Amino acid sequence: MLTAMRARPLPTRVVQQLAAVNILDLATRLAAQAFLAALPMLIAVSSFCPPGWRHELRRSLRSLLGSGRAQATMLDQMYSGDQQSMQSWGAVSVLVALLSATAFSRALQRMCERCWHLPPSGVRILVWRWALWLFVWLTALFFQGLLHDGFGAGPLLGVPLQAVDSVLMWWWTQHLLLAGRVPWRPMLPGALLAGVGAVGFSQVAALWLPMALQRSVDRYGPLGSVFTLLSWLILFFTIVALGIALGQVFAQEPMVRRALRLPEVSSGEVTPSTTR
């Protein structure tokens, strides 16, 4: 199937890939899992973090969501780490939140497999990978504020640093969640598109999201911020899914394969996992 697709013009293969992957469905699922599973995990973890780490988490989230009054109030309430919030999270609750957050990792795994047209891996192979991805993602998230500020040098250095960090994260994400079935170099185009696209979208969204959130809160109360944040997540993961899906197509292009020093596609090559 993939060999026949490669014989068709690039625009045709791009359209076929987007239709087969169903970008909007993937982005909506990822946004829902991020909102229902990943955000509660962040709240649970921040409740037990030292004050300095909570400050860095709020700083990192503000760098992604913008610095409007609505965001600041929402983040301060969610990640305050006061005594009442710490008492509401017991050890069992934190464990349940962490386990539930693996649903987000599983959704990312399904996105990568669908983009690369691979069957699902066994649970025993992936279960530790879901947990490892969450740990690395959470650790990287704490440093987004520092990266955004360029470690004190400002956004002129910070934005390129965030782009490099994002590309590396999505490159490694594909490798980890595909269980090594696709080699590193073919995954680089998708990582570049997803990483640079995600950072570019975050920079642009930081200009309109504060106003959109404030307007939603003024009109509909706290519930309005939920709809706005979900819309932001759907758009964000649309960019990511588009990048990885298009990266799979571009990785089959002769010019890209020569740039990546990959062998030419042979007629007997059926799946991406056979390219070494």
Image (cartoon, rainbow, N blue to C red):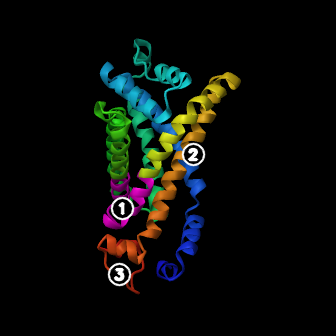
- The residue sitting at the right extreme is 219
Q: How many marks on residues?
A: 3
Mark 1 vs mark 2: give the one in front: 1
Is residue 250 something one can see in this rendering?
Answer: yes
Rendered location of residue 112, percent (x, y): 44, 59
Left or right: 215, with 88 as reference point:
right
**Above or below: residue 264 compared with residue 148:** below
- Residue type for callout 1: Leu
**Which span is picked out in magenta?**
170-195
Rendered location of residue 208, percent (x, y): 58, 35
- The residue sitting at the top extreme is 83
- Residue type for callout 2: Ile
Q: What residue sits right under mark 1 in the picture?
A: 188
Give the CA distance from mark 1 to mark 2: 23 Å
Q: What residue sits right under mark 3 in the picture?
A: 264
Q: Nearer the viewer, residue 268 or 215?
A: 215
Residue at the spot x=54%, y=51% of the render? Answer: 238
Q: What residue sits right under mark 2 in the picture?
A: 234
Left or right: 56, with 228 as reference point:
left
**Above or below: residue 195 compared with residue 72:** below
Residue at the spot x=36%, y=61% of the render? Answer: 188
Q: Residues within 10 Å of mark 1 (few under 14, many from 20)?
A: many
Rendered location of residue 24, percent (x, y): 60, 54
User: Counting residues from the N terminus, which is met first, the one under dot 1 or under dot 3?
Assistant: 1
User: Counting residues from the N terminus, which is met first, the one under dot 3 or under dot 2?
Assistant: 2
Q: Is residue 179 magenta?
A: yes
Left or right: 32, with 132 as reference point:
right
Residue at the spot x=31%, y=37% of the render? Answer: 139
Q: Are marks 1 and 2 in contact (CB under 8 Å)?
A: no
Give the CA distance from mark 3 to mark 2: 36 Å
Mark 3 vs mark 2: give the one in front: 3
